[in-house]
Each structure stands twice: as structure tokens, then as C-alpha cells.
Image (spheres, rainbow, N blue to C red):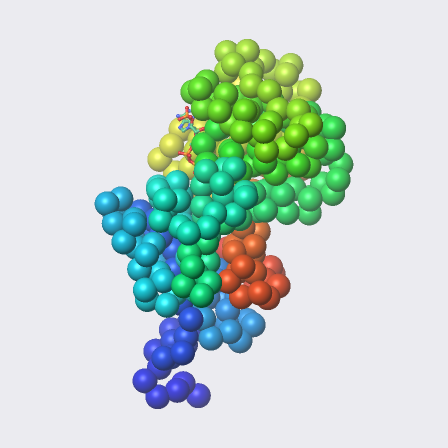
Amino acid sequence: MTPQGAFQRGGTTVTGTTQLVGIIGRPVAHSLSPAIHNAAFAALGLDMAYVPLPVRDEDVGAAVKGLAALGFRGANVTIPHKGAVLPYLERIDGDAALAAAVNTIVVDGGELRGYNTDVEGVRAALVAACGDSLRGAPGLLLGAGGAARAAALALARLGVDLTVVNRTAAAAERLVALTAAAVPGCTCRRLPLEELTATLVTEQRLLLNATSLGMNGAGKVPASLTDTVTAGQVVFDVVYTRCETDLLAQARARGAIVIGGLEMLVRQAAAAFELWTGRSAPLDVMRDVVRRR
Ligand code: NAP
């Protein structure tokens, strides 16, 4: 029965005691995170609710501080605010500091703490698909933005022999320096984009696209790259769209092992869920939500 004065929508009931979590970004209306987390809260019978919080660039500081003022348990942070929230947090977890990007905020006793669960999202998705088989194997990372910095940390820790290619050379150089400092002993080098050849692509065990290419409204990963994927390679695309990206569709058709951005989305959500609730995330419930969208 719905308590008096409670608001009910779908499986979510909001009462005077409900703990709130949100997602800060611009835009956020398209985000799958409210559906993923509300389904997970309902599945575990938790008195929690997750709301979209559209925030303008000039309001990021007020929004972050407002989480504590309003008694929120925390929030996710998405494009374009993952870096902008850092100065307003009282404590930054190691991976968030290393990636210079926060995608999860936890409010603990009024203290604002920043985390980066994208690193765990990449790690967990790769380990589920490949176990420890990538240790020492050559891997190519495309991109040097926030998602790529998180992916590089995960890949370096998994022992992948990493080559990074990015449109803007300086960003790739920064990523390589940051990863090498964060994971002593790892192999992580930059390759100029113009030196990326079909032979080099076919020599890789892993290809991971962490650019925005493939996202709705962005360009696509060049056919010169997708056409060289071979059976047995592992192809991971962090981009998530309603349909499979061209990169993943081609890779699947060519017999590669494919990992999509939706699996990463679920895995990073699971890690955030565990930070807010202290409970194991119901992965199947979360996956079911993204499959039905
Ligand atoms: P970002 O920080 O803006 O970085 C974008 C990256 O894409 C940069 O490396 C950029 O290269 C590259 N890029 C953009 N347009 C390009 C083009 N036309 N040609 C070549 N390279 C291009 O963005 P982000 O936060 O890393 O996000 C990247 C993607 O990952 C987005 O699609 C995002 O939705 C997705 N993502 C998914 C998850 C998940 O859970 N599945 C989590 C986080 C992010 P330059 O350095 O040259 O600009």
C-alpha cells in the first residue's frame, strides 16, 4: 500500500524518508541512469529514488553544494560536468583524481566525495568477457578524453600492452604520462594518428574505442579501422546508442568478441550503486532495463 502523502511512479515510491540520488549533466533527459537505478532500488526494496538534475555550466558549484544541503545521498555526473565538479568536492578518490573526472558523488555525513566508477566499468566488463587473458596482450585505445583516461587506467592495471591514438596529439601525450605515473611498470605509448596502419590494427588483441565517434550526431569510427577487425580480437566500444554502433556491428560480423557501451554503463552504475547503498548491485535487473530501452 502507498503511504499517505507518498508519490508513486512505476516501481518507485517517494515518501518523507526517501533518500535521493540524482544525475547532474547537460542534457540529462536522455539518460538511462534514472531507470537503471530506480529499478535496482525497487528490486532490493530500498527507500531510495533517482532523479535527473539538468545543470547549467555556471550552476555546477551551487548544484554540487546543494546535494549536501538538500540531504541527497549522492549523484552521478555526466557530460559536460565530470571535470567541472572537482573543485567543489571535499575529497577525491584516487581513480577520480588520476582520471581528472568524477562520475559519482557520495555525500557522507555532509562531506562531498568524488569517485570515478567508469574505471571499474571498463575493468569489470573486460574481465567478464576475457578473464585475465589480456595480460601482456597488445591493445589499441582510441581517444584521450575522460572516458579514455578511465579506460587507460583499467587497461594498464589489467596488464594490456597499450598503444594510444588520438586526433589531438597533446591530449594523448597527457594520457600516456598520467597512466604511466599511475600504474608503475605498465606499458603505455602514444602513436601518431598518421602512423596507424591496417597491419598494426590486425596485430592487436584488443581495440577499445573511447572517442565520441559512433555517438548519435558524431562521426563514425573510420571504415579503414572497422574493416580490418579480425576474428578472435576483442572490440570494446564505450559509446552507447539505441542500436549497436557500426564498429561493434562490423566486429561482430567479423567474428570478434564484442563489448558494448551499455555493458560498461551497467557496470559503472553497479559500482556507483554499491558506493551509495553498501549493497551488491542487482546486475541482471540493471541489464534488463537497458535491454528494454
Ligand atoms: P570527451 O572527454 O569529450 O572526449 C572525446 C574524445 O573523442 C576525445 O579523445 C576526442 O578527441 C575524440 N573525438 C571527438 N570527436 C572526434 C572526431 N570527430 N574525430 C576523432 N576524434 C574525436 O568525451 P568522453 O567523456 O571521453 O566521452 C566519450 C564517449 O564515451 C561519449 O560517447 C560518451 O557517451 C561515452 N561514455 C560512455 C560511458 C559508458 O558507461 N558506456 C561512460 C563514459 C563515457 P580530441 O582529443 O582530439 O578532441
Residue 247 in sight from this viewpoint: no
Looking at the image, is 251 positioned above or below residue 18?
above
In the rendered image, residue 62, in percent from the top left (x then y), is placed at 27, 54
Answer with left or right where residue 213 lies relative to residue 199: left
Looking at the image, is 97 positioned above or below residue 89?
above
**Number of marks in the image?**
0
Q: Quadrant of residue 241?
A: top left
Residue at the spot 66% in from the left edge and 30% down from the top edge? 184
Q: Nearer the viewer, residue 279 or 238?
A: 279
Ligand 1 is found in which quarter of the picture?
top left
Q: Nearer the viewer, residue 146 or 283?
A: 146
Answer with left or right where residue 151 lies relative to residue 48: right
Q: Nearer the viewer, residue 149 or 111?
A: 111
Residue at the spot 45% in from the left edge and 46% down from the top edge? 102
Residue at the spot 38% in from the left edge and 55% down from the top edge? 23
Residue 22 in sight from this viewpoint: yes
Q: Quadrant of the N terminus?
A: bottom left
In the rendered image, residue 36, in percent from the top left (x then y), is placed at 48, 60
Answer with left or right where residue 80 lies relative to residue 1: left
Q: Quadrant of residue 137?
A: top right
Looking at the image, is 268 positioned above or below residue 135?
below
Looking at the image, is 132 positioned above or below residue 44?
above
In the rendered image, residue 24, in percent from the top left (x then y), is placed at 35, 52
